[in-house]
């Protein structure tokens, strides 16, 4: 990781630590818009999060996919609800258009507008609050100029979704493979969340005393936590490769690896915490729900496994 990207990561981490505590995250997803507007403003103003993938000549930072992945990973650690994922994808869609709408791109880069991309109209990220809606079907890109949005009840409250129905649409160009980019960015977010979930579990094992000893001192639990660490770090390597060289294959590998690692960590975290983990007051249940929700968001891992199987045969 470059020095500039490390600085970006550290800056976002500091903002998240200060403004995205577990209590703040709960207030955010219970709010009318489903995210912390003040945190979003800070990310846009101090980090330029919404401008990372936008060229400098359009008011952006001229960054790369890896920059967006770094920020999403840090936000994933805290499960912080923000419009960054959807807005970034909308910007990439507009930039790939035959005739890019520069005025809209600039608004998105400033954080003055919220964007999203529709892959499945029944489950759209930021759908209820999006100002700019794009759609990608694997062949073409379209812009939904007018639409209706209905919030969808889901298990994962930290990622608001909505059902969108288009009324007026316009084709704007060929789909550059946005679903694969989305899969890579979600995988980066999953790695951040899995890392934090494991950290919380390790900390709990050091403080929870049973039979006169911290449960983390028992060899069986040490082995399980070591296996989880290996799973997360292995998945991180796969995701890093996908970020560096995006393709349909690398996206599928990243998606499967990150989903499996996060789901495994979250399930083990619930077991190691015991009954308290499934109470509303405890944060582990939020990570468990995010693990399962994000694994299904862009299609279940088995779909990506079938794609990889077809390529291998």
Image (cartoon, grey):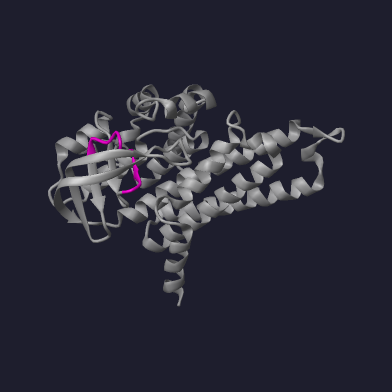
Residue 59 makes an appearance in the image: no
Residue displayed at 76% across by 32% down: 208
Residue displayed at 58% across by 37% down: 285
Which residue is nearer to you in this view: 111 or 82?
82
Which residue is nearer to you in this view: 292 or 98?
292
Q: Main secondary structure of the magenta part?
A: loop
The answer to whether residue 129 is magenta is yes
Residue furthest right in the image: 212
Residue displayed at 66% across by 38% down: 201
Residue 59: x %, y % from top left: 22, 33
Residue 157: x %, y % from top left: 46, 36
The total of numbered circles placed on residues is 0
Which residue is nearer to you in this view: 149 or 312?
149
Find residue 101 and report its image quarter.
Answer: top left
Residue 53: x %, y % from top left: 30, 42
Residue displayed at 58% across by 32% down: 283
Q: Magenta residues, as a range?
A: 122-132
| Residue 250 vertical placement versus 285 (above, below) | below
Location of the C terminus (image quadrant): bottom left
* 300 displayed left or right of 274: left
The answer to whether residue 19 is magenta is no
């Amino acid at each position: 990781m470059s020095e500039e990207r490390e600085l970006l990561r550290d800056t976002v981490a500091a903002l998240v630590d200060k403004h995205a505590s577990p209590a703040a995250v709960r207030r955010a997803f219970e709010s009318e818009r489903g995210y912390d507007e003040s945190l979003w403003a800070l990310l846009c103003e101090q980090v330029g999060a919404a401008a990372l993938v936008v060229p400098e000549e359009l008011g952006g930072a001229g960054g790369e996919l890896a920059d967006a992945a770094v920020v999403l990973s840090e936000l994933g650690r805290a499960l912080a609800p923000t419009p960054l994922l959807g807005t970034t994808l909308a910007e990439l869609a507009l930039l790939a258009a035959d005739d890019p709408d520069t005025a809209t791109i600039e608004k998105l880069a400033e954080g003055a507008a919220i964007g999203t991309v529709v892959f499945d109209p029944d489950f759209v990220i930021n759908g209820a609050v999006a100002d700019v809606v794009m759609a990608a079907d694997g062949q073409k890109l379209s812009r939904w100029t007018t639409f209706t949005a209905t919030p969808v009840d889901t298990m994962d409250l930290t990622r608001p979704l909505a059902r969108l129905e288009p009324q007026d649409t316009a084709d704007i160009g060929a789909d550059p493979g946005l679903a694969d980019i989305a899969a890579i960015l979600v995988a980066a977010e999953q790695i951040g969340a899995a890392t934090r979930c494991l950290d919380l579990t390790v900390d709990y094992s050091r403080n929870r005393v049973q039979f006169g000893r911290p449960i983390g001192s028992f060899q069986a639990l040490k082995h399980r936590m070591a296996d989880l660490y290996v799973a997360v770090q292995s998945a991180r390597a796969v995701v890093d490769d996908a970020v560096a060289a995006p393709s349909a294959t690398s996206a599928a590998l990243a998606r499967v690896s990150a989903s499996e690692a996060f789901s495994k960590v979250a399930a083990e975290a619930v077991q190691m915490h015991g009954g308290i983990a499934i109470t509303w007051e405890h944060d582990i249940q939020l990570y468990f729900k995010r693990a399962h929700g994000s694994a299904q968001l862009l299609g279940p891992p088995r779909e990506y496994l079938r794609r990889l199987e077809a390529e291998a045969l």
